[in-house]
Each structure stands twice: as structure tokens, then as C-alpha cells.
Amino acid sequence: MAYTNFTVETDSDGIALVTWDMPDRSMNVFTEEVMDELDRITDQVVADEAVKGVVITSGKEAFSGGADLTMLQKMLKVFKEAEVRDHEAAIKMLFEGAGRMSWLFRKIETCGKPWVSAINGTCMGGAFELSLACHGRVAADGDKVKMGLPEVKVGLFPGAGGTQRVPRLTDGQQALQMLTTGAALSPKKAKGMNLIHEIAEPAKLVDAAKAMIRNGLKPVQPWDEKGFKLPGGPVYSAAGANLWPPAIAILRRETYNNYPAAAAILKCVYEGLLVPFETGLTIEQRYFTEILQTTEAAMMIRSLFVSLQELNKGARRPEGVAPTKFTKIGVVGAGFMGAGIAYVTAKAGIPVVLLDRDMPSAEKGRDHSAGLMDGLIKKGRATAEDKEKLLSLITPADDYGQLDGCELVIEAVFEDSDIKKGVTEKSEAVLAASATFASNTSTIPITGLAKNSRRPKNFIGIHFFSPVDRMMLVEIILGKKTGEKALAVAIDYVRAIRKTPIVVNDTRGFYVNRCVLRYMSEAYQMLIEGVPAPMIENAAKMAGMPVGPLALTDETAIDLAQKIMKQTIRDLGEKAVDQEQFALINTMVDTHGRHGRKNGKGFYDYPAKPAKKHLWPGLKDLYPQKAPEEIDVEVLKQRFLVTIALEAARVMGEGIVTDPREADVGSILAFGFAPYTGGALSYIDGMGSAAFVKLAKQLQKKYGPQFKPPKVLVDMAAKDESFYQRFDPYADRRQKAA
């Protein structure tokens, strides 16, 4: 029998090798067609008496990334259309669709013949759930082999038996931690948790899997055998009493009840362990059907799966420009940012010249990479050979002549226009006419900097975020004269270093910093109003932000905030900056000498380790304090999210960002805008533009003009329009198809 996505070969021992290798895809994923074929394969091997057992593996480098979530998007679209006609019938249809994969895997594990999953590479989500349904599991030994159930990161949870099999294979605490965090497991870790049976050399993986069958592997799962006992003990036991109350408390502490899928995981596990296995699968199916309908799931799937993938594949790259193969890249400025850029470039296997004013400074920049690699070695994520190879790709230099031959040069010097002018001129003097020059500026408009260039078409902004090695977003900023080739080169480079690019038109602060400054500014306003600092920080975290705005200001430096305000006043006048907030920042810096984390004194105090940072007690003396019970925490949460979302809307209205996918993904990756919302624009879309404008106007009336909705939002509210309707990122694609 022939299949599109699988091959089936039976050896002389009667072991069928099922190889999953989808054509025209770089990675195997579950689609309707794949599930149909796997169903037929199960029937085929059961019907064939010559087949004694099955080994399933992948023909690609990775095993599988799990389900194609666009399949779920289509399912939800059909559901919403059907719901208008018949709500009950639509729910039933969605319920059956939600359980398709789960019951297919149950069919495999009860088919009467042993199945072994031979995991040769990345095995995530539904693919790992398939593996857990197999009677035996063997993983290849190697750093690139990872397993896990990451669904919670996109607003879902493992809905194909994951919440039922994992806690029946390992203890409750490890099961809950894995399921609620979506953490990836190494083969060693997975084996330690009893989630896989063996680890084999990659070349002997399939042989090891076949050996399990030849050695008499039973085609029955532990939970289907009489007398099965849970590894962590029953729910109603001393062990259960020690697990469940803290687990619920920890979940609330970590999620602030913002993630319905995470709460559903606890419910599935708790309820499922009280009943027979198949009843547990039905419970899981019901909760999965419920979670599929949440706004959080819809928005997170769209931004953190679909949009993120599209941007990573170069959705904004100009058509018709040949891809750039990088053989040499220059980085001018070997400080913290420049050294970080050199590191991620070398990590991608690209030779890089790291240039500074003298060799000791340049060598110090290379030492930064050595330190990062030492950290990875300590964690077991790199070897001494990896370190040596990476450092060999970084050439410290103090002579601009060594930039000759670079396809791209990135300057990462001080935020000073005169210094950047000198770097541009000296670099261009040795670069080929076709080379691209980029500035890593975070504040200075690119169009102004490009005036220093003899070829502004080749001048572009590539704005990294700190620390470069950990932050996954890069803003690519277009000057007024930046050409398509420079944009293509910039996107090619960002993709080469495995980060996510967003394209931004030129403006002061670009996109991310404009939003971040609004976040910080609202915190300053709250301080001035007398809101206690702990409430400000906690409300922000309750809203879903990873770091409080005062802590974030400390990280970026309070004196930097002062410099930005002063520069803004010089450029745009006093009215461009809130004078009360300016006075607060001046008081912190000039009166109290509190510059932020860098001098150990900011909105927080930073005592010597092992003591932890704590809010500076003097904050409460700066302004008369309100009693906490007088303050509505929900309103504080709204103020933080709304002020950022409004700035994102303004940026779209001004044409600074033109693609809502970039605004959403950028807001999450750059500064952690409440991921459960799907991003700053999806926060508005999820609420509805009319409801959002109403809320913004209420906040404007009570707290100030920063909450005034821009014209673009008011117009959208009148039509009840979403950003993905008004700024449809797929409009061009549909026009071409038509």
C-alpha cells in the first residue's frame, strides 16, 4: 500500500519500519492527511499476520514538530461559521475534531501489536504524544535531540493524551512541571523521568528499537494492566496532599490566572487520575475543546506560532533580490553590544571582524564570547572544541582596512552622532560599493545618520536588544533612502543568526522603544500619584509583564532615561516631555545619585550577593502615599497594557510599522508584552476595537491624555474593525492568487 507521507517496509523478522518523511516540508507535522494515513497504516499492520511489531521513525533530521497549528485555525474557522447556524452541532463537531489525534493514538496502543518510537531528533507536541502512546520508546543520543510538550506556550495544552500518559509514567511533581512550563527534555532527562526506555547511538537507533520487539515487548501499556499503580501515588494520599495544594498555589503565582490552558492542565491531570484511562482521555478532550474557543488560544496561536514562523522565514523580505551568502561580517565597537553581536554572528558560523580603537579593547570584546561559551560548557551545552571553533571565527582588529571584503558592517559605538559619522566614513572608505552598512542605534533616526553615507541606499538600521545572545528580536530600520537590497541583506543576516526580524520605518525610538518608554512612563505617573511602588511592580506582573517597569528602568539605567528626556526637550521642546516625570527622574539621578543597577542604586537597592535586590525605601518619601486599599489593582493592570497597546496603534497609524504580525511578535519578543494576549495589537483585537476605545477614553478622563485613542483606532471602532482586517498582512498574497 502506497502512502504520501510514510513508507512501510517489513523485514524478515516481521518488523514493519514506518518512516515518516513528508514531501516538500523541512519538518514532519501532523495534518489531516498524515492522521488519515497513520490510521490506515495501523489497520494495515494489524491485518497483516506477517507483521509482529512496528517501529516508527523519521526520514528527516528531526522526528516531528507536532501538529500543524494552522489545521486548528481552520477547524476553529469552520466551527465559528457553523456555530451561527447550530450551536450544539458546532460544539459536537469541534469536540470530535479536538479528539481525532487522541483516539488515533489510543487505537495504536490497543491494536494488539507492539509499537516502538525511534526518536532520531526533535520530537515535540503531538509527535511526543504519539511516542508516549507507543509501547517502547528509544531516543538517539545527541545534543540536538529534544522532546517535550510545549503547547502551553501557544495557549493550548497537550490534548492528544499528554496530560494522561505523562503523570502515569512519572511522578506528579515532574509531570506537572513539564506540562505547565512546556520545557524541552534531553534524552537523559526523559529517561530519568521514565518517559523513554532507552538511549541509543544515532546509527544504531532503529536496530535498538527493533531489538525491543524481538525481545518480546508487550503490546500493552502499563495503565491497561490490572493492578497498575500511579508512580506518584493516588491523588487522595499523603503524596497527593503534598502535591496538589502547592501546585495550585505555584500556578497562580507564576501565571496570575492569565493562561487558561495552564489551569486546564491541572484540571485534566487531577480529574484524569481519579478515573479509568479512557475516561481521562475524554476529560482531556472536553477541556481541549473548551480551551480551543478561548481568545487567549486564538491570539497566541496566531502570533507565537503562525506569525512567528512566517517572519522567521522572511515574510517581509523583498522579492527578486538574490540571497546573500555571508563570508565576512564587520562589527565596529567591541563594547557590550558589539561583543554580543560578534558572538551571535560567530555562533552562526560566520567569520567576523571585531574592530575597536585599540587591540586591547577589541580583544576584551572577544573575551566576552569566551565567557559566554564558558557558561555553556558549565551547563553541558557546549564543549571546549565548540569554544575554540567559535573564537577562531572572531578576529579582533584596530585597523579599518580589515573590514575589506565584508558583505555587511554593523556599527555598535556610543549613541553619539559625531562618533557614528566618523565610523561610517572610515568604514565606507574600505568597503566594496555593494556592501551594506548598518547602525545598531537605539534612539537616533536612521535617515539622519545616513546623511553621513556616500551611498544611503546601502545604509540601514539593525537594532539589537540587550543582552544580544538571549534576546530573539531584531528591529530592521529603513531610512528614507534605504534600498531593497540593503533590506534583503539585513533580513538574510538576522535569519542567519537565528533571530526574528521586524521591519520598521524611521522615527525617534523606532517601535519597541516607543512602547517600552510608555510602559515606564506610566509607572512614573503612578509614583507621582502616590501609588506604592510594590503595587506598581506587582500590578505589572499580574498584567502579564515579565519585569516590573521600575526594575526595567533600573536595567536600562535611570540616567539614560534622563538623557533621553533631555535630548527630546532639546529637539522637540519642553512640552514633549512630562515635566513632573522629568522632575522625578532628575531627583533620582541628581539629588540621590541613583542611576540604576549599574551603580547599585536605582528604584531598587542592589546589595552584595547572596542578598536579593529590594525596592528603595526612600521611594515612599518622594510623594504622599495612597493607602493600598484605595487603589484598584485591576485598573493599574489595565493602565499598563492599554498605554502600550495605544502606542502600538499610533505606530501603525503613522505607518512606522505596517504589518500587524511584526507589531505583535515584536512586542512579545522584545519586552515580553503579556504573551497570553498575542501581542499589543492582538490585545486590542481580542477585546474588540470598540470596547478598547471605550476603555481608553475612560482612562483618559481619569488619568490623562496619554490614553487618548489615535484617529486610526477611533475609525476602526466605528466600523468594529480589527488590525488584521485593516492592515491585512495577506492582502498582496490573495491578490496575486486571484
Image (cartoon, rainbow, N blue to C red):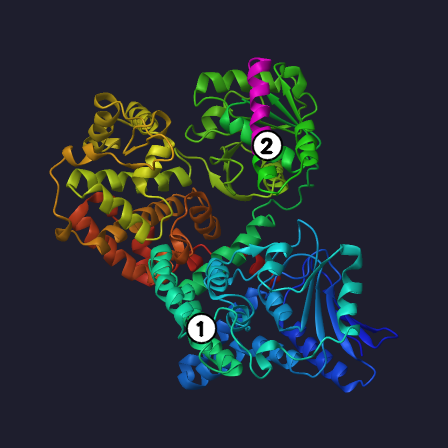
Q: Is residue 316 left or right of residue 38?
A: left
Tag 2 secondary structure: helix
In front: mark 2 or mark 1?
1
Q: Which mark is residue 268?
A: 1
Residue 538, percent from left and from top: 28, 48
Q: Nearer the viewer, residue 650 or 116?
A: 116
Tag 1 secondary structure: helix
Q: Is the residue 661 above or below the residue 369 in the image? A: below
Magenta segment boundaries in residue numbering: 356-372
Q: Is the residue 640 above or below the residue 350 in the image? A: below
Q: Which residue is mark 2?
A: 343
Q: Nearer the viewer, residue 357 or 648?
A: 357
Residue 223, percent from left and from top: 57, 78
User: Label 1 amino acid?
Assistant: Cys
Q: Residue at x 21, y 22 (%)?
A: 591
User: Label 2 amino acid?
Assistant: Tyr
Q: Quadrant of the N terminus?
A: bottom right
